[in-house]
Amino acid sequence: MVKRVVEKAWRIKGNLEMILHGERAYILKFYPEEDIITALEHGLVFKSDVPLFVRGREPYVEQGLENIQAVPVWMILRGVLVHYFNPKGLSIIMSVIGKPLLLDGPTTSKSRMAYARVCVEANPKSYLKNTIPW
């Protein structure tokens, strides 16, 4: 069931191999590797109110599963002033939430300025704000 959910949500084009790791984690192998980028860019998926997210490969991942201090979350920002609609401005705004990681393609190229989409590393135990005061 989890495999079907992530394949559909992340629009995986190739094969996805999932290996259960403990009770709450999976090790994913993507074929072709371009699907990794798609999954990382898409980010968080919810299934039955349970967040599913993908992180890049890290050494000793087994030792850190119980103590995850940060998760990547894609945030959408609406109403960003034009002079803040750049990597530096968006990074300053998103530092209120956590550590800014990357912008999606249309945000970087400014081909869609109705909203900005920014991936932020946030503490999973913190309350995420719905609005950021100016």
Image (tube, rainbow, N blue to C red):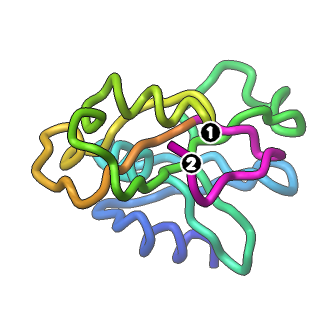
Count neighbours of disc 2 (C-alpha within 10 A) and say few if under 14, some if 14 to 19, many if 20 or more: few
Q: Which residue is mark 1?
A: 97
Most common secondary structure along the magenta stretch? loop
Of residue 21 and residue 45, the one placed in the foreground of this image is 45
Asked if the residue at tag 1 contacts the one at tag 2, i.e. Cβ–Cβ closer than 8 Å, the answer is: yes
Asked if residue 34 is positioned above or below residue 113 in the image, the reply reads above
Residue 68 within the magenta-colored segment of the rendering: no
Residue sitting at x 28%, y 64%: 13
Answer yes or no: is residue 6 visible: yes
The type of residue carrying mark 1 is: Ile
Place of residue 73 in the rendered image (x, y in percent of width and height, measured from the top left): 56, 48
Give the magenta part as a residue range.
121-134
Which of the 4 image quadrants contains residue 84? Answer: top left
Percent across and percent down for residue 61 are 73, 29
- Left or right, 3 with reference to 128: left
Residue 81 position, x and y percent, is: 28, 44
Which quarter of the picture shows residue 122? top right
Q: Nearer the viewer, residue 25 or 118?
A: 118
